[in-house]
Image (cartoon, rainbow, N blue to C red):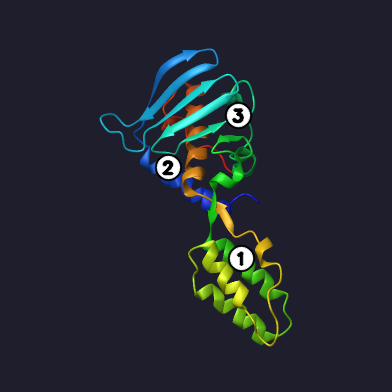
Amino acid sequence: MADPAPDRLAEVEAHFASVTAEHVMEILHDEGLYRHVRFARPRTAMYHYDLVTWPGHLAISGDCGNFVFSRLRDMFEFFSEGCINPYYWSEKLVSPYGRNGVLSFSEDAFATSVREWAEQQEDGEVRLAALRMIDQEPVSADEAGSLLRAFDVKGVRIQDYWEWEMRDYTHEFLRACVAVRTGVAAYRAGATPQAAGAAPSG
């Protein structure tokens, strides 16, 4: 499972920046590795979120998702390194456990897999029939599996389709990644998230 397309993560970052532009940071507890930091717009709870750390763990809760990560003793240090990396960060989840907990069926991933398979076919009629499956817009892994299983054109069937990766990271998880990185940067800068700016992705 690779990282999401850069434009998808950029869209999440842009939306997050717009809905949290007036957020301010409130430090509720700050004692070594034990921290509780809240980000919210004054007089409203919309898109608020809390970051809580204890040795080896960081939890995010609120309107930007509920997740717990574990990697380094100081998780603020972990989320300060490099760029936003959903693939690597999902490996550090302990709640929900692991990457599978933040993946869901993706029409875009389904379409990409179908196109890749179609490009390998020499017969134009087979290629066209395969591409028509994309237009049926399955909304679940079961629907996609039914389409792929039923495909039979000129005796050509799709083999091993169950091995295709037709999932992508949920919007909630990507938003949580952006929130964590932006919040940690704001805490370290001693500024509000908008002053710290959106975290770099890539």
What residue is disc 1 on?
112
Q: Establish if 193 lies above or below 118.
A: above
Q: How far, Cα to Cα, is label 1 from label 3?
A: 32 Å
- The amino acid sitting under disc 1 is Thr
Tell me the number on the disc at residue 70. Answer: 3
Q: Establish if 164 lies above or below 158.
A: above
Tell whether label 3 touches label 1 (CB within 8 Å).
no
Q: Establish if 57 lies above or below 30.
A: below
Element type at marker 1? helix
Element type at marker 3? loop
What residue is disc 2 on?
16
Residue 118, given in percent of the width and then of the height, sits at 67, 75
Instruction: Kindly identify the residue that appears in the image at 49 percent across and 70 percent down.
Output: 137
Mark nearer the viewer, 2 or 1 = 1
Mark nearer the viewer, 2 or 3 = 3
Mark nearer the viewer, 1 or 3 = 3
Q: Residues within 10 Å of mark 1 (few under 14, many from 20)?
A: some
Q: Residues within 10 Å of mark 3 (few under 14, many from 20)?
A: many
Q: Earlier in the sequence, mark 2 or mark 3?
A: 2
- The amino acid sitting under disc 2 is Phe
Q: How far, Cα to Cα, is label 2 from label 1?
A: 27 Å
* Horizontal arrangement in the rendering, residue 42 relative to residue 168 (left or right): left
Residue 202 visible here: no
Instruction: Kindly identify the residue that appears in the image at 51 percent across and 16 percent down.
Output: 34
Q: Earlier in the sequence, mark 1 or mark 3?
A: 3
Q: How far, Cα to Cα, is label 2 from label 3?
A: 24 Å
Residue 167 visible here: yes
Q: Residue furthest left?
A: 43
